Image: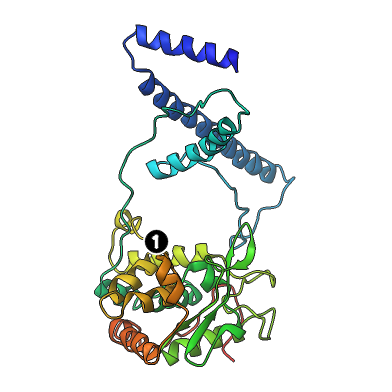
Amino acid sequence: MTGLKTESQKTEKLYRINNIPFEIWQKRSLEEKAKEEQEKIDKALKEEIENKKAEIAAGRQKQKRKNASQRKLIIIRFPKSAKRKNAIIQAGTILLTWAFHKEIIDRNITAGITWFSGASQEHQILSPEQAAAVFKVEWKDERAKLANMLAMVTGIRAGEIQVLRVQDLGKDCLYIRHSWNRIDGLKTTKNNESRTVEVPFPGLLKDLLNLARQNPHIQSMDGYVFWAEKSPDKPMEQDIFLRDFKSALVKTGMSKESVKLYTFHGWRHYFTSYMRDRINEKLLQNQVGHKTIQMLNHYSGNIISGDKERIRQAQLEVFGGLLPDNTVGFKVVGSNYGNN
């Protein structure tokens, strides 16, 4: 620790002699190092692609067919937003502060640390007219279209949609019991609680069941509704939900630059924004499973008489005119399975 401390003091003194505030140098240094690391990653990826092309040209490797899935490369890029940068810094400061309080280190080296500043990017949501238009254009994969429709009229999370199974489809509702992410796979919901989500659209529920019947792997109550084409053990990737959503937005006439401001998670904000004035907060929180108020958590599980009808009526009023005849004709890319 002594060597690091001495070196840090020398560096700080050097920059103060040259009238450069050490904090500015420190921030610039971090960004420059991150840029250098990113350049190394980009260079390595470029070399890998060029080497693969050379192998194919020399006949030592076969060319993949055009519609074959590409190997996904996980690239950890330096975050651009102040919130993401601060989250990374905080991950280290929590441990170091704990070590100081436990007297494992002799001083709190996180004291006086400089945090990044900057406003968080505002979530963009569509207008009702834009939402109606996006479901009138042709989608590449109707599974993604159905997932986006479901997110719009229920506000449920992408991972909760991904992992829906036949047993989760009710007569006029969905039973949200699980969620999914790439790291953990099948897991509990974000707040570790199951809930019932109202879906007063018979055509939409029928389409979910029809999609489940097209599952080429499992024809049972355990089968995924949004199934993956190749693997029977996991649902389709939620990246497809977002990819096709953005493609549909472009088809409505939105510029590619504007499309960047919209995310699949934005449907959750869309739902809560347009439902907020229709039903009370307790009912809304129960529907989306986003509990943030302690007393609300205590009472949200107690649905009183008439609450179900109020939620359903509000959904019909807000979203009923946005769905194209409450039906979806499935056209699953890469699949030869028809409707049953």
Residue 49 in picture, x, y percent from top left: 60, 42
Residue 311 in picture, x, y percent from top left: 36, 85
Amino acid under label 1? Thr
Q: Nearer the viewer, residue 57 or 86?
A: 86
The residue that label 1 is drawn on is: 263
Element type at mark 1: loop
- Residue furthest to the right: 60
Q: Quadrant of residue 100?
A: top right
Residue 215 in picture, x, y percent from top left: 63, 81
Above or below — where is 146 with respect to 250? below
Residue 266 in picture, x, y percent from top left: 37, 64
Specify whether residue 148 is in view.
no
Q: Quadrant of the C terminus?
A: bottom right
Q: Quadrant of residue 17?
A: top left
Q: Quadrant of residue 43?
A: top right
Specify whether residue 124 is in view.
yes
What residue appears at the point 51 percent right and 83 percent down from the top-left corner? 174
Q: How is the image coloured?
A: rainbow
What residue appears at the point 47 percent right and 12 percent down from the top-left corner? 9
What residue appears at the point 48 percent right and 87 percent down from the top-left corner? 173
Q: Nearer the viewer, residue 147 or 47?
A: 147
Above or below — where is 282 with respect to 40? below
What residue appears at the point 47 percent right and 67 percent down from the top-left corner? 241
Above or below — where is 92 with respect to 318? above
Total marks shown come to 1
Q: Nearer the viewer, residue 152 or 187?
A: 187
Q: Quadrant of the N terminus?
A: top right
